[in-house]
Image (cartoon, grey):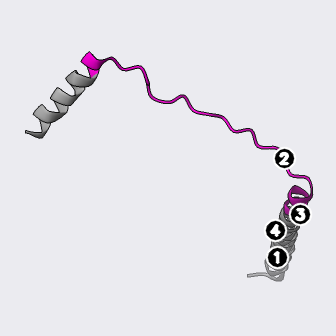
Amino acid sequence: MNPQSIQLLTQGLGLMGIGMGFVFSFLVIMIFSMGGMARIIKVLNELFPEEVKVVEKPGKRANVSEDEAIAVAIAVAKSRG
């Protein structure tokens, strides 16, 4: 290898190290800032809680006729043997 290619390889490795360092430092800063924001949001949610609306789910049909109830009971009894 000639000295020029060694110099280019060294510069390339240096640039790669600098680029990876910037990306790594950005990710570390982002992780810590997201953790800090999560803590801030948790405190704000305790200070200013939102009202939670309770939504009732529609229940099962309550007005089942006697014929339907008898038919279901017979089907269950027959399936169990």
Q: CA distance from mark 3 to mark 2?
A: 13 Å
* Res 17 label: 1
Tell whether 69 sits left or right of 35. left
Q: Secondary structure at mark 1?
A: helix
* Res 43 label: 3
Question: For the residue marked with disc 1, what is the amino acid?
Answer: Gly
Q: CA distance from mark 1 to mark 3?
A: 39 Å
Q: Secondary structure at mark 3?
A: helix
Q: Quadrant of residue 76?
A: top left
Q: Are marks 1 and 2 in contact (CB under 8 Å)?
A: no
Q: Earlier in the sequence, mark 4 or mark 1?
A: 1
Q: Which x, y percent locates residue 43?
A: 89, 63
Q: CA distance from mark 4 to mark 1?
A: 21 Å
The part of the chain drawn in magenta is 40-68
Q: Quadrant of residue 79?
A: top left
The residue indicated by pointer 2 is: 50
The residue indicated by pointer 4 is: 31
Up-down relation of residue 3 to residue 54 (above or below): below
Quadrant where the image shows the N terminus = bottom right
Up-down relation of residue 59 to residue 3 (above or below): above
Residue 41 is inside the magenta segment: yes
Q: Quadrant of residue 69?
A: top left
Tell whether 32 sits left or right of 81. right
Which of pointers 1 and 2 indicates the residue nearer the eye?
2
Q: Earlier in the sequence, mark 1 or mark 2?
A: 1
Q: Which x, y percent locates residue 14?
A: 85, 77
Residue displayed at 83% across by 83% down: 3
Question: For the residue marked with disc 3, what is the amino acid?
Answer: Val
Q: Earlier in the sequence, mark 3 or mark 2?
A: 3
